[in-house]
């Protein structure tokens, strides 16, 4: 039913594209933020390298990668609703409404965190060598993980933004909720690194996919309640 | 009058499970031996906690549908009672683990799940404390409550089934799977679960009434 109403309203679909474009423009205009995020990625990766990260075992490699991505994503998402506070809140409410905004936001944040994690993977490969046996499965895990991750972070940030809280509140809310996703993603990534048979990975990928759908649906259904004054 | 019946029933069932849990004869299984009696005291805590959290979730959904603030108070009271059961479950489990596995804490999916559940609901209380306006507080925390409950079910209900656990009945460990949970254990375990859920409901209703009085 959700899908039907989603696609019936063509006007809503038509608004999602421009909204995503607008989010991206806002990000690009604020080039200082992107620059600092890139600097954070390079700096932290090199710091881990200096502290002996190149000798890390597979599970440590994954843990480090996800911690780097995690804090980058928290940092990005904490600015996620910056532009929607104050007067912009009423502006978006009038022109788009909550359901369109949340879909656009989910797509945009997923893409952003995906780029972030791809950059982190590239940097890790550069400094520590790429020890991934099966890059396709690894990338699939990364994509599904980033989608679930962004949905949780987007909702947590919406909550902390609406409650007038600070960035700490959104991390407190998001950290325990992201753990199921991170747990499954790191299991998929480990199996991609050691080259486990695909049949063993499919079950994990399937459950992560189902979890992503559930999280996304919840965020979509709950966001309008948040979006009231 | 009807309000007293469930309280009396809850107390009676809890007393029955506490006393007969120690008196009944149990199956003789290796390693866990007599500590299998912890089934009545430890596992029933988790069932009661999930019951309380489910009630809290139901009231959160109810609040979003009708914007009735008394539902929000019920939801909070049930979540607080659920936290009490979570800590009791953690404590009884740690005692048991020390004597059966030899450590207070192990990296077991069920233990991780319960730790995460406690973190999630502590964050819920932090969130509630941060908002002043009651209606806004109720709406935002109801949204978080619904999200948190679903993630909790995923974490304690689904993830442990995907990986091996040290818990009895999982991954080839001796214990109470469907064959071993025999009728002698069931006769005490199920009444214990029902009794603790009734007592928990009573505690939550007292907290709810205190909140009502302090609001007015």
Image: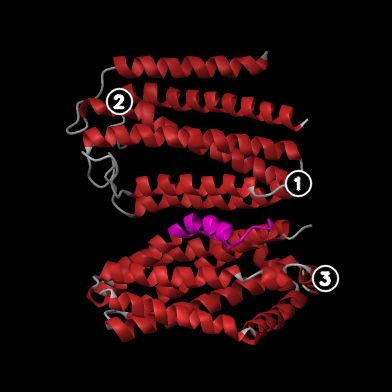
Q: Which residue is mark 2?
A: B37
Expressed as whole percent of the image width and height from the top left, the position of residue B148 reads: 55, 50
Q: Residues within 10 Å of mark 2 (few under 14, many from 20)?
A: some
For residue B170, what is the image quadrant? top left
A89 to the left or right of B41: right
Task: Return the residue at label 3.
Answer: A94
Spot occupied by residue B72 in the image (x, y as percentages of width and height): 69, 40
Q: Kindly identify the residue that appears in the image at 27 percent across and 37 percent down.
A: B97
Chain assignment, label 2: B
| Figure label count | 3
- Please report the bounds of the magenta region as a residue range: A163-180
Label at residue B135 = 1
Above or below, B87 relative to A176: above
Label 2: element kind: helix
Q: Residues within 10 Å of mark 1 (few under 14, many from 20)?
A: some
Give how far apart the Cα atoms at labels 1 and 3 are. Answer: 23 Å
Q: Chain of mark 3?
A: A
Find out whether residue A164 is within the magenta segment.
yes
The answer to whether residue B93 is above or below residue A57 is above
Q: Secondary structure at mark 1?
A: helix
A73 vs A14, nearest the viewer: A73
């Amino acid at each position: 039913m959700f899908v039907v109403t989603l696609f019936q309203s063509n006007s809503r679909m038509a608004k999602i594209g421009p909204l995503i474009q607008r989010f991206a423009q806002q990000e690009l205009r604020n080039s200082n933020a992107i620059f600092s995020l890139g600097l954070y990625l390079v700096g932290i990766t090199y710091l881990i390298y200096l502290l002996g990260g190149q000798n890390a075992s597979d599970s440590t490699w994954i843990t480090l990668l996800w911690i780097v991505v995690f804090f980058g994503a928290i940092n990005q998402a904490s600015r996620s609703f910056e532009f929607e506070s104050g007067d912009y809140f009423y502006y978006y409410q009038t022109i788009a409404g909550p359901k369109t905004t949340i879909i656009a936001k989910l797509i945009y944040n997923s893409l952003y965190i995906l780029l972030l994690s791809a950059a982190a993977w590239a940097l890790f490969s550069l400094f520590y060598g790429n020890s991934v046996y099966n890059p396709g499965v690894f990338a699939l895990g990364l994509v599904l993980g980033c989608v679930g991750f962004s949905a949780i972070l987007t909702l947590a940030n919406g909550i902390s933004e609406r409650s007038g809280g600070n960035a700490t509140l959104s991390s407190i809310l998001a950290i325990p909720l992201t753990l199921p996703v991170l747990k499954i993603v790191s299991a998929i990534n480990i199996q991609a690194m050691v080259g486990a048979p695909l049949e063993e990975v499919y079950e994990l990928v399937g459950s992560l996919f189902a979890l992503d759908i559930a999280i996304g649906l919840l965020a979509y259904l709950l966001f309008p309640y948040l979006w009231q004054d | 009058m009807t309000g007293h019946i469930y309280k009396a029933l809850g107390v009676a069932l809890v007393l029955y499970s506490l006393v007969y849990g120690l008196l009944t004869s149990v199956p003789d299984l290796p390693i866990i031996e007599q500590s299998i009696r912890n089934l009545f005291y430890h596992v029933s805590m988790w069932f009661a906690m999930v019951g309380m959290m489910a009630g809290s979730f139901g009231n959160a959904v109810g609040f979003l549908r009708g914007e009735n603030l008394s539902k929000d108070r019920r939801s909070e009271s049930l979540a607080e009672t659920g936290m009490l059961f979570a800590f009791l479950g953690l404590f009884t489990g740690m005692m048991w683990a020390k004597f059966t596995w030899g450590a207070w804490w192990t990296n077991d999916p069920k233990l991780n799940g319960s730790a995460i559940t406690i973190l999630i609901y502590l964050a819920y209380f932090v969130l509630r404390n941060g908002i002043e306006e009651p209606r806004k507080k109720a709406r935002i925390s109801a949204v978080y409550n619904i999200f948190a409950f679903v993630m909790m079910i995923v974490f304690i209900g689904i993830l442990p089934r995907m990986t091996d656990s040290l818990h009895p009945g999982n991954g080839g460990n001796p214990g109470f799977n469907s064959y071993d949970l025999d009728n002698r254990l069931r006769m005490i375990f199920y009444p214990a679960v029902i009794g603790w859920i009734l007592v928990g409901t009573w505690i939550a209703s007292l907290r709810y009434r205190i909140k009502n009085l302090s609001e007015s």
